[in-house]
């Protein structure tokens, strides 16, 4: 049995330590990159919500001018009712869209704020998207 153990080849402690060190270095390089991917995906979700809100406003602002309906109510029905409800990528419990005649007092990360200014005969709608620190990342003003 002793003869068998002396002839068997195996890994030395130094070899095992080197492999563990290389794996540790690779993990240290890759983990920060993976963490940034999540935020990037969430910001892409906010941009997607912004484009959907912008398309809804552009499609309905002329219809609003031709009817007696309230543009704020039209946008609320389109963007905040099932099955068209947008989801906030940073906080699923928070609303993805805030629609009003003034900018919201409290900003929610990932939220799209739609401000409808209805001064006849000109109506303008400002759409602003907020990032994870509640900073405006994109703004668009639409007038018919």
Image (spheres, rainbow, N blue to C red):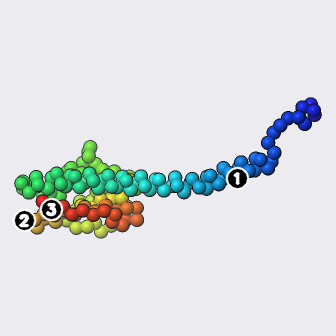
Using the image, determine if residue 88 lies above or below residue 83: below
Q: Residues within 10 Å of mark 2 (few under 14, many from 20)?
A: few
Mark seen at residue 81? none
Q: In which quarter of the image is the N terminus?
A: top right
The residue carrying mark 1 is 21
Label 3's element? loop
The residue carrying mark 2 is 121
**Left or right position of 100 against 19:** left
**Left or right position of 34 against 88:** right
Instruction: Work out how far the residue at label 3 is from the one at label 2, CA to CA, in angstroms.
Output: 11 Å
The residue carrying mark 3 is 143
Quadrant in the rendering for residue 144: bottom left
Q: How crowded is mark 1: few (under 14 residues within 10 Å), some or many (20 or more)?
A: few
Q: Nearer the viewer, residue 25 or 141?
A: 25
Instruction: Work out how far the residue at label 3 is from the one at label 1, CA to CA, in angstroms.
Output: 60 Å
Dot 2 or dot 1: first in sequence order is: 1
Q: Residues within 10 Å of mark 3 (few under 14, many from 20)?
A: few
Dot 3 or dot 2: first in sequence order is: 2
Using the image, determine if residue 76 lies above or below residue 126: above
Whether the residues at callouts 3 and 1 have beta carbons within 8 Å, the answer is no
The nearer-to-camera label among 2 and 1 is: 1
Q: Can you name the residue that lies furthest to the right here?
A: 2
Label 2's element? loop
Q: Is residue 118 visible?
A: yes
Residue 67 pos. (x, y %) = 6, 54
The nearer-to-camera label among 3 and 2 is: 3
Residue 117 pos. (x, y %) = 16, 66
Residue at 29% from the left image edge and 56% from the top image edge: 50
């Amino acid at each position: 049995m002793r003869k068998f153990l002396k002839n068997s080849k195996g890994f030395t402690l130094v070899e095992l330590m080197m492999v563990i060190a290389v794996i540790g270095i690779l993990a240290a390089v890759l983990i920060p990159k993976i963490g940034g991917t999540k935020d990037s995906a969430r910001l892409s979700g906010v941009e997607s919500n912004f484009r959907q809100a912008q398309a809804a406003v552009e499609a309905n602002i002329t219809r609003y001018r031709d009817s007696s309906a309230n543009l704020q109510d039209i946008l609320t029905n389109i963007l905040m009712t099932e099955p068209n409800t947008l989801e906030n990528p940073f906080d699923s419990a928070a609303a993805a869209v805030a629609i009003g005649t003034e900018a919201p007092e409290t900003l929610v990360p990932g939220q799209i704020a739609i401000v409808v200014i209805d001064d006849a005969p000109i109506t303008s709608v400002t759409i602003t998207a907020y990032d994870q620190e509640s900073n405006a990342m994109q703004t668009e003003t639409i007038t018919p």
